[in-house]
Amino acid sequence: MQRFNEYHPIINLIFIVIALIITMSSINPYTAGLSLFMALLYGRYLYGKKYLKIFAFLSIPVIIFAAVFVPLFSHNGETALFYINDLPVTLETILFGLVTGMMMLATISWFYVAGSMIDTEKFLYLTGRLLPTIALIISMTIGMIPKLIKKYKEVSDAQAGIGRNSGDMSVMRRIQFMLKKLSIVISWTLEDSVNTTVSMESRGYGTGKRTNAHLFKFIRNDRIMLVLLMAFGSFPCTMAILGKYRVNYFPSMEFTEITFINVVSFFMFFLFMGIPMASDIINGAYENSGENMSKAAANSNERRDNNGR
């Protein structure tokens, strides 16, 4: 076993695609809640407590929009809870908004988690042959963001080094000072873009047939993981595409009948969502056991040397 982000890019892409299809194909509280729970669990495992803080920050506007604004503008449903200006606020609309918000948060969470699986190199591998120019632009843009943040900090430190501290300035002076630092960063970005363009032209970019080079090989572990993903994900994905998870909210709520097949598909969906974290946990335990075995062997050798002395 190996960590999930160490698998072939196709494996990572298949997992994300199936997870999003099941999450977004139907506004079902069971699939949306289960997907959101597993995304939060895996995100907490990957990024720690800061992930939950980011999620809480993102969830506030989504919940306000889904649970407050949607019922104010949509008045469908037959269970009126109260009236605002003679317009009913219905239970069905509130539940529809809450489930929609859960689905949106689950989708955002899986996209955030996908950042740990698919880096710029994997992204280029997946899209380079189909859309080489667009893939190159997107990868360069993604790579430019941390450079801009680092350059802005360097400019701020340099300005502070010569005695220009924004803490002692008025509000207008702070705005002017920030705009000046942004102007320096933008000038550096334009200069770097020109240098990149000249470098690419000097290496013959765009003058002939383009070849692709990558370091990814589909090995035995990738085949095993592919079988696992298809075994647990294909059935619930098919059920979602066929509309078996469909829920009607208007005029009254009508859930899909809970059958043995639906229960099995939900359980398989749960197992499918847990595959990446299980892979990471098993690999981490294996690495820890290997380290412990190495330490034990080193201690044994040390004792043997001491007894020999």
Image (spheres, rainbow, N blue to C red):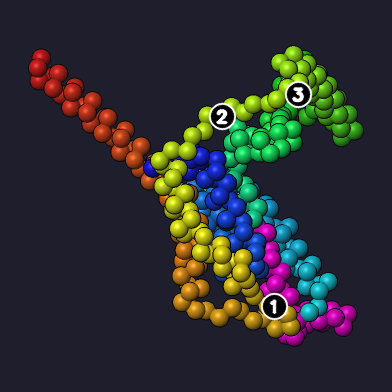
Which circle's residue, 2 or 3, is located before the other in the chain? 3
Within 10 Å of disc 2 (Cα), the crowding (few <14, some 14-19, many 20+) is: few
Task: Give above or below for 180 relative to 89.
Answer: above
Element type where label 3 sits in the image: loop
Residue 57 lies, in percent from the top left, at: 67, 52
The C terminus sits in image quarter: top left
Separation of marks 2 and 3 at Cα, in angstroms: 19 Å
Q: Is residue 273 left or right of residue 302?
A: right
Task: Compare residues 128 and 299 and report the one nearer the observer.
Answer: 128
Question: Mark 1 or 3, which is nearer the eye?
Answer: 3
Disc 1 packing (10 Å; few <14; some 14–19; many ≥20): some
Q: Amino acid at mark 2?
A: His
Q: Quadrant of residue 33?
A: bottom right
Q: Could you tell me the amino acid type at mark 1? A: Tyr
User: Does residue 253 show up magenta in the picture?
Assistant: no
**Residue at the farthest front position:** 209
Disc 3: which residue? 206
Q: Quadrant of the N terminus?
A: top left
User: In percent of the image, x 36 and y 37: which residue is there?
Assistant: 287
User: Label 2: which residue?
Assistant: 214
Q: Amino acid at mark 3?
A: Gly
- List the residue tagged with mark 1: 249
Part of the protein shown in magenta: 77-106
Can you tell which of label 2 and label 1 is closer to the viewer?
2
